[in-house]
């Protein structure tokens, strides 16, 4: 009789552990299936690539990207300005500010912000290309 009770207790513990393990595996599986947020902007040719790191100013950059994606340029500008108060020499923030100004029709300011971005990161070819696209498009629209 005692052996039977012991078997029941062990069986119950094994069953409980297996249930927890299955739940954990299900969570891991679902997390691995999650897809990243799409980074689609109104002016795709001048938009920056998404930032993968989500720390400090990079978190603000991600928030800016979301605001731009939602065409909420006033919110994006507010976040950019907050980021620039923290790191005024951040080339990516100046590039995002250029995108925001461009999307709002402030082409001269967009050009100036893109030039600032280039000044703070002259060796980043990808960022340089995006800034050059903004500058060219802004100049064309200003003519």
Image (tube, rainbow, N blue to C red):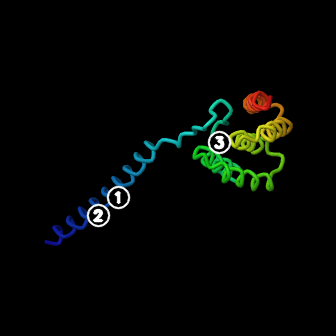
Quadrant in which the N terminus appears: bottom left
Q: Secondary structure at mark 2?
A: helix
Q: Which residue is mark 3?
A: 51
Badge 2 density bin: few <14, some 14–19, many ≥20, Cα 10 Å: few
Q: CA distance from mark 2 to mark 1?
A: 11 Å
User: How many numbered circles are shown?
Assistant: 3
Q: Earlier in the sequence, mark 3 or mark 2?
A: 2
User: Residue reaching furthest bottom?
Assistant: 2
User: Residue reaching furthest right?
Assistant: 119
Left or right of 134? Residue 21 is: left
Name above or below for residue 115 compared with residue 14: above
Q: Which residue is mark 2?
A: 13
Q: Earlier in the sequence, mark 3 or mark 1?
A: 1
Q: Which residue is mark 1?
A: 20
Residue 96 placement (x, y as % from top left)? 72, 42
Residue 126: quarter of image: top right
Q: Secondary structure at mark 3?
A: loop
The residue located at (38%, 49%) in the rendering is 25
């Amino acid at each position: 009789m005692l052996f039977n009770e012991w078997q029941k207790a062990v069986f119950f513990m094994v069953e409980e552990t297996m249930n927890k393990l299955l739940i954990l595996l299900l969570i891991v599986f679902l997390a691995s299936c999650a897809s990243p947020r799409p980074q689609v902007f109104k002016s795709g040719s001048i938009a920056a690539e998404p930032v993968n790191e989500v720390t400090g100013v990079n978190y603000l950059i991600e928030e800016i990207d979301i605001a731009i994606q939602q065409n909420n340029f006033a919110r994006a500008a507010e976040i950019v300005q907050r980021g620039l108060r923290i790191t005024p020499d951040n080339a990516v923030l100046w590039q995002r500010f250029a995108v925001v100004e461009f999307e709002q029709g402030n082409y001269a300011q967009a050009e100036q912000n893109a030039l600032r971005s280039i000044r703070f990161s002259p060796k980043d070819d990808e960022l340089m290309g995006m800034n050059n696209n903004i500058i060219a498009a802004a100049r064309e629209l200003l003519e």
